[in-house]
Amino acid sequence: MKTSVAVVGASGKIGSLVCRLINESDDFELVAELGSQSDLSEMLPAEFVVDVSLPSVSKLVLEYAVENGKHIMIGTSGWSAERIEKQRPFIESHPDVNVVFISNFSLGAALSTHLATVAAKHFDSIEIIETHGVHKVDSPSGTAVSTAEAIAGARDNDIQAPHADQRARGQLVSGVPVHSLRMEGVVAKQDVIFGGVGETVTVTHTTFSNRSYEAGIMAALRALRTHKGLTIGLDRVISL
């Protein structure tokens, strides 16, 4: 029997991709496509909810889904670790509901962040440059925020970020300067640059097509069946 799914933000690029993948799958059934004018009650016939809406409404979607007993996968940008932690008590007060937060559905992005946390232990000078298309509404990207938070969590001491108070030095995220570019002709690219004595190391991930998200989307959606409670990051879903 197929699991019924509602997609919030179904008309967007990622939302359209999610809808297509669900329709092509053997184990899921798309029963509701919610847009900006939809009432959240339209998700109620579904067992699972996928939220790929906007940062300004994602919290409302999460709360409505959880309160109504719907397992939910959130792929909307803007969910920093701090913001997720604020929701943890609410989520844990509904122990029968599973919630998965994914900042980036690309398997390569998850692996790149993992590699960056390995390098972070060996370099004190670390900065991130992330590039997306001109229509991306948030900056820094959710992926860059998650990467910076993971880097900080892997270290025992502060990252060197001289002159961080200067505007051109980027936005500090967990002590890591993050520089955001929004340009035509780009899907997504992230460079994590590590500086040491006489050398630099760069961990780069480039997305050329939204097809790179397909495997991660389906893995995260299926994780709603098996990952109990709160799960944060595609790396937890694919067990990096």
Image: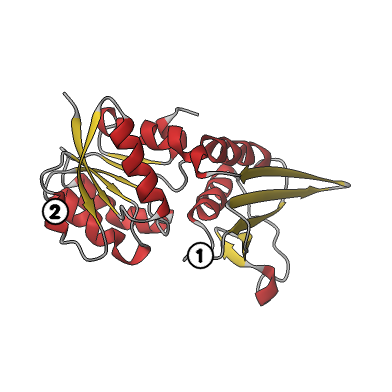
Pinpoint residue 158: horizontal percent, then vertical percent.
63, 55
- Check the image and report above or below for 9 versus 208: below
> Secondary structure beneath disc 1?
loop
Please tell me how crowded label 1 is: few (under 14), some (14-19), or many (20+) other residues with Cα within 10 Å: few
Say which quarter of the image contains residue 166: bottom right
Residue drawn 52% across the image and 51% down it: 143
Q: Is residue 80 visible?
A: yes
Please tell me how crowded label 2 is: few (under 14), some (14-19), or many (20+) other residues with Cα within 10 Å: some
Pinpoint residue 204: horizontal percent, then vertical percent.
68, 44
Mark 1 vs mark 2: which is more N-terminal?
A: 2
Numbered mark located on residue 30 in the image: none
Say which quarter of the image contains residue 40: bottom left
In which quadrant will I find the N terminus? top left
Numbered label tally: 2
Mark 1 to mark 2 CA distance (whole Å): 27 Å
Residue drawn 50% across the image and 44% down it: 210
- Which residue type does callout 2 highlight? Glu
Left or right: 175 with respect to 37?
A: right
- Of 238 and 31, nearer the camera is 31
Residue labelled with disc 2: 42
Residue drawn 50% across the image and 39% down it: 211
Q: Is residue 101 visible?
A: no
Pinpoint residue 106: horizontal percent, then vertical percent.
50, 39
- Of 19 and 123, nearer the camera is 19
- Which residue type does callout 1 highlight? His
Residue labelled with disc 1: 135
Residue drawn 34% across the image and 40% down it: 20
Left or right: 168 with respect to 151?
A: right
> Secondary structure beneath disc 2?
helix
- Of 131 and 210, nearer the camera is 210
